[in-house]
Image: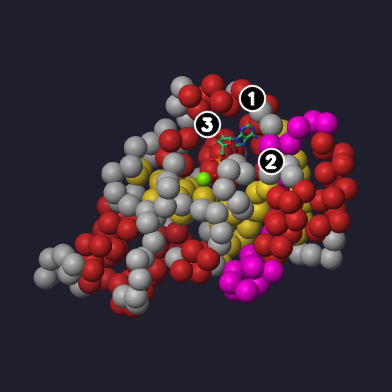
Amino acid sequence: MTIRFSLVGKGGTGKTTLSALLIDFLIQKNKVPILAVDADPNFNLNELLGLKINTTLSEVRESLLKGEGPNFMSRYEYTEMKVYEILVENRYFDLLVMGYPEKSGCYCPIHNFLSTALEKLMRAYSYVVIDNEAGMEHLSRLNLTETEHLIIVSDASIRGISTAGRIVNLVKNLKINSKNIWLVVNLCPKSKKEELEKYVNEVIKGKEIKFLGFLPQDPTILKYELEKNPVFEWESPLKTEAFKLFEKLFN
Ligand SMILES: Nc1ncnc2c1ncn2[C@@H]1O[C@H](COP(=O)(O)OP(=O)(O)O)[C@@H](O)[C@H]1O
Ligand SMILES: [Mg+2]
């Protein structure tokens, strides 16, 4: 069975950083093979994973819309082949980049082929980590609604945390089906922790959200980002703390 993690939340809260750290954590725990999915049209997860991108799923869609492909293959077989072709392969994980969304209109057969191929692909891995764009509407559009762990990432602000609390309603409206909904408050200065913890408890009270914990504002990661070091090479308080929180996902 495949265990899926989907990271959601506002822009700039740390979804991509935490997705990359989660992949690093899973590898260190020997929880492999992993499929990393970059579902943000402004994809950048590859940078933290130290990978270069050639093509995205949106280019496959374009090619299918143009009717490209050999006659000796069915349209579905061709779709599946192309989806495998765009995977960036690595030792313990592969990366799939979704690219930009469908422009408009319903290309139903092609949409269905892509969803089916994607679903089949995800089932071939033990773990799937999905790094999302801000918002969640695309999850329905891309058929990424089934997940074991939905991780809401918030910054350490009152407004950020209350927005995160409201995501649960959105989850219901969008028919996202997640066994566990977690809240993680990232970018937290030490001094704010206690006060914010009270607020977090108020926000999640009576809701289906579990509090994963706080992660510190960590100045050391700027250097790694500037030098384009993949997360696997980081030695930072953020990584240490994030790994402690990720343990909770397996308890
Ligand atoms: N805990 C943290 N401490 C310091 N900087 C952080 C932390 N988490 C994220 N960042 C930085 O904030 C910026 C946005 O993070 P990112 O993971 O790209 O957010 P998102 O994917 O949610 O838009 C990045 O430059 C990242 O390095
Ligand atoms: Mg991001």
- The verdict on label 1 being within 8 Å of ligand 1 is yes
Q: Of callouts 3 and 2, which one flags the residue occurring earlier in the amino acid sequence?
A: 2
Q: Please, what is the three-letter code of the amino acid marked with disc 3?
A: Val
Label 2: element kind: strand
- Left or right: 224, with 155 as reference point: left
Is any part of residue 91 visible from this angle? no
Indicate left or right for 92 with 220 as reference. Answer: left
Position of 226 compared to 197: left or right?
left
Crowdedness near tag 3: few (<14), some (14–19) or many (≥20) residues, C-alpha within 10 Å: many
* Label 1 or label 2, whichever comes before in sequence order: 2
Q: CA distance from mark 3 to mark 2?
A: 17 Å
Q: Amino acid at mark 1?
A: Pro
SS for callout 1:
loop
Q: Residue at x 55, y 54 (%)?
A: 134
Q: Quadrant of residue 119?
A: bottom left
Q: Which mark is residue 219?
A: 1
Judge depth for marks 1 and 3 and give the one in front.
Answer: 1
Q: Which mark is residue 9?
A: none
Residue designated by label 3: 231
Q: Mark 2, residues whose alpha carbon is within 10 Å: few (<14), some, or many (≥20)?
A: many
* Front position in the image: 245 or 218: 218
Nearer-the-camera pick, 13 or 16: 13
Label 2 CB less than 8 angstroms from ligand 1? yes
* Residue drawn where x is 22% and y is 62% of the image: 63
Residue stretch rendered in magenta on the structure: 169-191
Magenta stretch containing residue 42, yes or no? no
Circles 1 and 3: CB distance less than 8 Å?
no
Q: Amino acid at mark 2?
A: Asn
**212 versus 170 height, above or below:** above
Q: Position of residue 247 (x, y in %)?
A: 70, 43
Q: Which residue bears the numbered disc 2?
A: 186
